[in-house]
């Protein structure tokens, strides 16, 4: 769009739409991870695996703050 000389506001609208779509995908993947990987770690009773999954969630939420 930039190379085509499109209007700046149109480009910004497209960027916003892309960001919103990525946020939806990110949320769905996070839900899936919690419902599958984290749940399995909890059910396993393996404290090391539970800590690992918990730390993964902490790291991803910390990155989301940026």
Image (cartoon, helix red, strand yellow):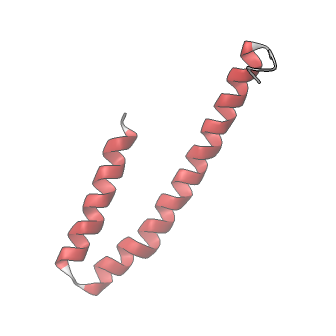
Looking at this view, name the residue that lies furthest to the bottom. Answer: 44
For the image, the number of numbered tags is 0
Q: Residue at x 18, y 77 (%)?
A: 47
Q: Residue 64 occupies which quadrant of the picture?
A: top left
Where residue 22 appears, as percent x and y from the top left, is: 59, 45
Residue 32 is left or right of residue 44, and the answer is: right
Q: Quadrant of the C terminus?
A: top left
Q: Residue 8 occupies which quadrant of the picture?
A: top right
Where residue 57 appears, as percent x and y from the top left, is: 33, 57
Q: Residue at x 69, y 35 (%)?
A: 17
Q: Residue at x 77, y 24 (%)?
A: 1
Looking at this view, name the residue that lies furthest to the front. Answer: 3
> Where is 15 relative to 10, above or below?
below
Residue 48 is left or right of residue 2, and the answer is: left
> Where is 14 relative to 61, above or below?
above
Where residue 20 appears, as percent x and y from the top left, is: 62, 39
Residue 11 is left or right of residue 40, and the answer is: right
Q: Residue 2 occupies which quadrant of the picture?
A: top right
Where residue 48 appears, as percent x and y from the top left, is: 18, 75
> Where is 52 relative to 27, above or below?
below
Front residue (pair 38, 52): 52
Q: Residue at x 47, y 59 (%)?
A: 30
Front residue (pair 24, 5): 5
Looking at this view, name the residue that lies furthest to the left. Answer: 47
């Amino acid at each position: 769009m930039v190379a085509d000389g499109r209007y700046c506001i149109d480009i910004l609208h497209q960027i916003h739409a892309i960001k919103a779509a990525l946020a939806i995908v990110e949320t769905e993947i996070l839900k899936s991870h919690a419902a599958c990987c984290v749940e399995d770690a909890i059910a396993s009773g393996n404290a090391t695996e539970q800590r690992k999954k918990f730390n993964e969630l902490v790291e991803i939420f910390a990155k989301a703050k940026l």
